[in-house]
Structure formats: C-alpha cells, structure tokens
Amino acid sequence: MARGRKKELNLTLEEQLEKLQIEIDEHTETLKVLKSKKKEILKKIEDKEKEDVYRAFLDSGKTLEDLKILLTESQPLSGEPEASED
C-alpha cells in the first residue's frame, strides 16, 4: 500500500521559518561535535606517528646528532632545485 507525503499542519511562514531554524541549530551543534571528534582522532593519529618515529629512532641506535645530520643532508635547502639525473 503506497503512502502519501506526511501532511504538515498548515503552518504560517513564520512558524515554518522558526521550525527550520531549530533544525539548523540542531544540525549545527551536531556538526560541532563531529568536528571536535575528528580533531581528537587526528591528534591521536599524529601522536601515534610521532611515537612510531621515536621508537624507530631508538631502535636504530643512532645518536640525536646522527639523526640531525641525516635529516639535513637528505633535504635540499628550500629554494634550490633538486639536481636531475639526465
């Protein structure tokens, strides 16, 4: 059996607007909560990645100075094009 559309009460335009604003406010609050949860998860991912890098550093047996040298040698200075091998 087919159902028709829900019949809305004959609301005035002002009442329709108020009802719509309430829905917008509810969804806005939901969006804020979801964005906050997203931010928390991204922070946890970042912390885990940092921990992974730190563990790899400790497991390598390298010194902090070794790591600094390795990182500075492997990155070209900004503004300088990388040498191409033609």
Image: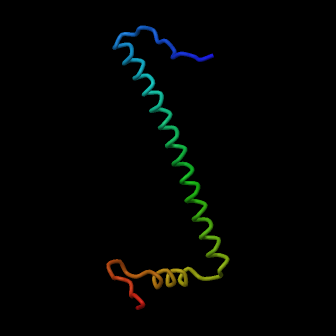
Q: Residue at x 51, y 48 (%)?
A: 39
Q: Quadrant of residue 10?
A: top left
The answer to whether residue 86 is above or below residue 59 is below
Residue at the extreme left of the image, as rendered: 79
- Rendering coords of residue 37 (x, y %): 55, 44
Residue at the extreme top of the image, as rendered: 10
Q: Residue at x 52, y 40 (%)?
A: 34
- Front-most of residues 39 and 81: 81
- Rendering coords of residue 53 (x, y %): 59, 70
- Front-most of residues 60 and 26: 26
- Rendering coords of residue 46 (x, y %): 55, 59
- Rendering coords of residue 13 (x, y %): 34, 13
Q: Residue at x 58, y 54 (%)?
A: 44
Task: Name the quarter where the N terminus is drawn.
Answer: top right
26 to the left or right of 51 = left
Q: Quadrant of residue 86?
A: bottom left
Q: Residue at x 49, y 43 (%)?
A: 35
